Amino acid sequence: MILRLTSMAGKRSRHGGASEKLLRCQTRALYSVSGLDDDEPLVRRDRRALSVSSIDEPIRLSRQPHQRRSTTPQNSARPEDFRSWQASHNIDIQRVTQTAMIHELTQQQTRSIERVVPWFLNTMPAPYFRQVPESFRLDHIKAISAIKDANMDMHMNLKTHLPDGRQVLTFIRPGTMPGLLLSMIKELPYNQRSEEYMPLSRVQIYSAEDDSMSLNLFVYGEEAKQLTEADVTMTGSHILEYAQQLLDETLPPADEYGRPNPKPNEIFSRERLIQHMEKCTESYIIRSDPRRFLSQFELFEKVSGSDNISVSIEDSFLDGNNEEHYWIDIALANTLPHFALEQTTQLLFLHGFDVLRAHLDNVTDGDNGTVTLLRMLVTPGQDGARGDEPTFNLIKQELKRSKWLAPSTMELVYEKQPWLGVRRGEIITAMCTIMHPIMSKQNAIAFSKGNILETVTKDRYVNHAAAIADLFLDRFDPKNPLSEAELRERSEGLIAIIDNEVEDTPAQELLIKMIDIVKYTLKTNIYMNNRYALGLRLDPRIMASEEEPPRETPYGVIFSHGRRFDGYHVRFRDIARGGMRLVTPASSEQFSLESAHQYDECYGLAYAQQLKNKDIPEGGSKAVVLID
């Protein structure tokens, strides 16, 4: 505005009096707005405050009123201290402060990003950059930069909404200590009983190579699977080409990394592969290595149409320390992905293995639901875990069992007493279930189902329960079973130890009853592979209680103990016929009551059927299954 006035003043001689009058009016208007006296020369404006509010607002001119000298301290503001470039109004000061803060934070964040990006690129594993989209990687860098810039722990959860409705949860945690992945899985917010439940469709687990950070992605929601034959032919061309070379036997026994190539298989034909890829998600096909895809296809075929689990373990040939890193591939048919991931992680943690990387994908299996494909890179931890053949054979066996374990067994072997192992834990919880209908007749409160399990698994008594479980395993060891004399001798030794070391009378009675169950068990499937539950054929005399009147002894009793169910089958002849009753209590209290008289109910139904069948060769039998 001042430049404009000066320009007009320079043209006064040409425009005459009118222009001079107009200039004088505009000058007075400027002075009245800025607070300057109209007779004060503009050359003295350096003693006035020039207020600059922001770059996108006009400049305000303000004049401080004349002040007399004050007796205030020397550091107080004086009119002479103000400069023409200094803001004087409160709102202008706020805006200038905001601008300064924004500039300072921007510079600080820029410096932080300049430090984080090289570190991030050098420490994250190569599969992370191959498998995670660039937009996600940028979000991760920004989040990590913000954490480091604020000098906070590397602890953050990110939630991303994808255009197709899926959600991605990213968990960033400091370090790579054992059990970290398991703790993150337990923090996942979704469960199958929620109205907002979304199935876990993909998991990607990564650890920084300097062990400073773990970054895990959990994808919820189903990915669109509308892939045609033309789509999978184009998307999976690298897989189809690799499979054809295998069938033509033009590939060497091992690839360039030293990994053995799969053996030719008829399921690797082009038609079978295309049919299989139509069931897969596009992202799974794109990011899968051909060798890995075919290996998981073989596992898929082993469990398709069933409820089984197939496991494969091999060395990690891509790592420098082959003896310390191993890939575990698991195919779980018709199971919840979240449950499969948690159970597998818990079991590996129980055996002392750390999970370095992991991938989870779901493949549809027609009317049988889905097959969850889980791949984990593991390494032995610091507590003496060993990656030898006996250890992996045990892990394979327990992985196949983990799907069918009762919740009480999982809590016992994964949380309370992990040193027991799956087999011993399963035997202990099964015996506690058998004892409930027997011992509750003596004292329903002291020998409730919860009290029985809690007493037997206390730290003071769990060693005795484990010794009894070992006696059970040794008796039915298919390679070297115990003889009756050896069983009697070891049983008497355990009873003597219990009498000497256990002072609590209820605990003594329970442990001795467990020894009786071992002696009265005739057959078991404890050593069978791919079993769905633990089964025991019992001598019916073990189910008799001293508090009940004598009654007819059945011919045989079979007990089964599995995931969320316990069942009894009673028959009064070797060849018998009958039915099965399913009991589904509505609450945990009702479940405990039903458990107390489950055997008696089964006995009564079988005996009634025996009376009905008095005129036919078959005897009476019944089964009662209590479902949790």
Image (cartoon, rainbow, N blue to C red):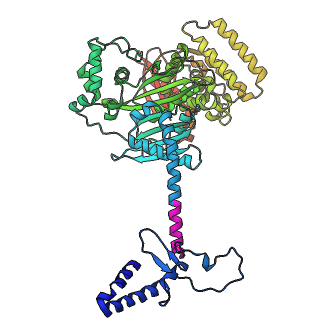
Residue at 23% in and 28% down: 233
Residue 220 position (above or below residue 425): below
Residue at 37% in and 32% down: 362
Q: Nearer the viewer, residue 111 or 48?
A: 48
- Quarter of the figure that contains the N terminus: bottom left
Q: Is residue 76 visible?
A: yes
Q: Quadrant of residue 253?
A: top left
Tell me which secondary structure the magenta stretch mostly adopts: helix
Residue at 71% in and 80% down: 72
Position of residue 498 measured from the top left corner of the image (x, y, whole percent)? 74, 21
Residue 163 position (above or below residue 519): below
Q: Nearer the viewer, residue 383 or 459?
A: 383
Q: Is residue 282 magenta?
A: no
Q: Is residue 92 magenta?
A: yes
| Magenta residues, start to end | 87-101
Position of residue 139 measured from the top left corner of the image (x, y, whole percent)? 44, 45
Position of residue 132 measured from the top left corner of the image (x, y, whole percent)? 40, 37
Q: Nearer the viewer, residue 541 or 244?
A: 244
Q: Nearer the viewer, residue 218 or 86?
A: 86
Residue 108 lies left or right of residue 484; in this view the side is left
Could you tell me how many numbered marks the image carries? 0
Residue 294 position (above or below residue 436): above
Position of residue 329 measured from the top left corner of the image (x, y, whole percent)? 44, 23
Residue lying at the far front of the rendered structure = 13
Q: Is residue 440 visible?
A: no
